[in-house]
Amino acid sequence: MQSAVLEHWKYNFEKEEEASSDAIDQDEVKDVSDRVWRIVLSDYQVEHLSMSQEYRAIVIKHEVEMGRK
């Protein structure tokens, strides 16, 4: 979490020089880290668990018909 905040400093700090480990509340980093789920999939799983283009098109068609984006 901390490295992500530092890497994307522009969303949290005005200047890159202000972004440092000392400027980040470590309790908040731990709290967010505890709540984030990390899922790691192999290439095989991604290939076989992904929705096919055909099924994705059906879902999108249904959403459009329901008036959603």
Image (tube, rainbow, N blue to C red):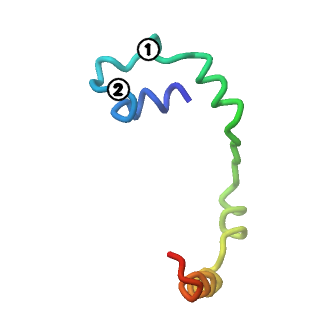
Q: In the displayed structure, does residue 41 sit left or right of residue 13?
A: right
Identify the image quadrant of residue 7.
Answer: top left
**Residue at (69%, 42%) from the top-left corner?**
38
Q: CA distance from mark 1 to mark 2?
A: 9 Å
How far across and how far down the image is residue 13, in percent? Answer: 35, 26
Residue on which disc 1 sits: 23
Furthest-top residue in view? 22
How far across and how far down the image is residue 37, in percent? Answer: 70, 42
Vertical side of 61 occupied by 35: above or below:
above
Q: In the displayed structure, does residue 17 sit left or right of residue 33?
A: left
**Residues at discs 1 and 2 in contact (Cβ within 8 Å):** yes
- Say which of 39 and 26 sits in front: 26
- SS state under label 2: loop
How many numbered badges does the structure rendering display? 2
Identify the image quadrant of residue 20.
Answer: top left
Furthest-front residue in view? 67
At label 1, the amino acid type is Ala
- SS state under label 1: helix
**Residue at (46%, 15%) from the top-left corner?**
21
At label 2, the amino acid type is Phe
* Quadrant in which the N terminus is drawn: top right
Callout 1: few (<14), some (14-19), or many (20+) C-alpha neighbours within 10 Å? few
Q: Which mark is residue 62?
A: none
How far across and how far down the image is residue 40, in percent? Answer: 69, 48
Identify the image quadrant of residue 34.
Answer: top right
Q: In the displayed structure, does residue 49 sit left or right of residue 58?
A: right
How far across and how far down the image is residue 16, in percent? Answer: 30, 24
Choose the circle earlier in sequence order: 1 or 2. Answer: 2
Q: Which mark is residue 13?
A: 2
Q: In the displayed structure, does residue 12 sit left or right of residue 29?
A: left
Callout 2: few (<14), some (14-19), or many (20+) C-alpha neighbours within 10 Å? some
